[in-house]
Image: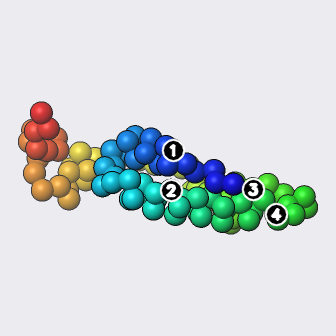
Amino acid sequence: MSEITIDTVKHVANLARIELEDEKAAEAFTKELDEVVNYAHLLDELDLSSTEPMFHALDLNNVLREDEVAEPLTQEEALRNTKSTKDGYFKVPKML
């Protein structure tokens, strides 16, 4: 049974601001999207009862450095690599 109807395709196209050329295009999209959904339903057949849920395929951990108290940069050091300064501050283009 088809889960994707031509009305659904037209509604989603309208929301996405996609202009469907004609009824034939809408029918083609309907058929293609229905095939994609049916293919995704193949996952329903998998036995996942022994699979532990996870958020990511890889076990990633943040690598953070230790916070260490150190001397802050001087104003001259902070401004050393900038292209332009004015009165001891970074000079940037106007935004507004």
Quickly name the residue at label 2: 30
Q: Give the alpha-carbon distance from disc 4 to disc 1, as whole Å.
A: 26 Å
Residue at 13%, 44% in the rendered image: 92
Q: Which three-letter amino acid code belongs to the residue tagged 1?
A: Thr
Q: Give the alpha-carbon distance from disc 3 to disc 4, as whole Å.
A: 19 Å
Residue at 50%, 56% in the rendered image: 30
Quickly name the residue at label 1: 8
Q: Measuring from the top left, give residue 72's x and y in whole percent.
A: 37, 46
Residue at 46%, 57% in the rendered image: 27
Which of marks 1 and 4 precedes in the sequence?
1
Quickly name the residue at label 3: 54
Which of marks 2 and 3 precedes in the sequence?
2
Q: Which three-letter amino acid code belongs to the residue tagged 4?
A: Glu
- Report crowding for label 1: few under 14, some 14 to 19, many 20 or more residues within 10 A (C-alpha): few
Q: Give the alpha-carbon distance from disc 3 to disc 1, as whole Å.
A: 32 Å
Quickly name the residue at label 4: 45
Q: Measuring from the top left, give residue 1's x and y in whole percent.
A: 69, 54
Indicate the secondary structure of the residue bearing disc 2. helix
The quarter of the picture where residue 58 lies is bottom right
The C terminus: image quadrant:
top left
Q: Give the alpha-carbon distance from disc 3 to disc 2, as whole Å.
A: 33 Å
Q: Measuring from the top left, give residue 63's x and y in whole percent.
A: 60, 60
Q: Give the alpha-carbon distance from disc 4 to disc 2, as whole Å.
A: 24 Å
Q: Measuring from the top left, give residue 48's x and y in whole percent.
A: 85, 61
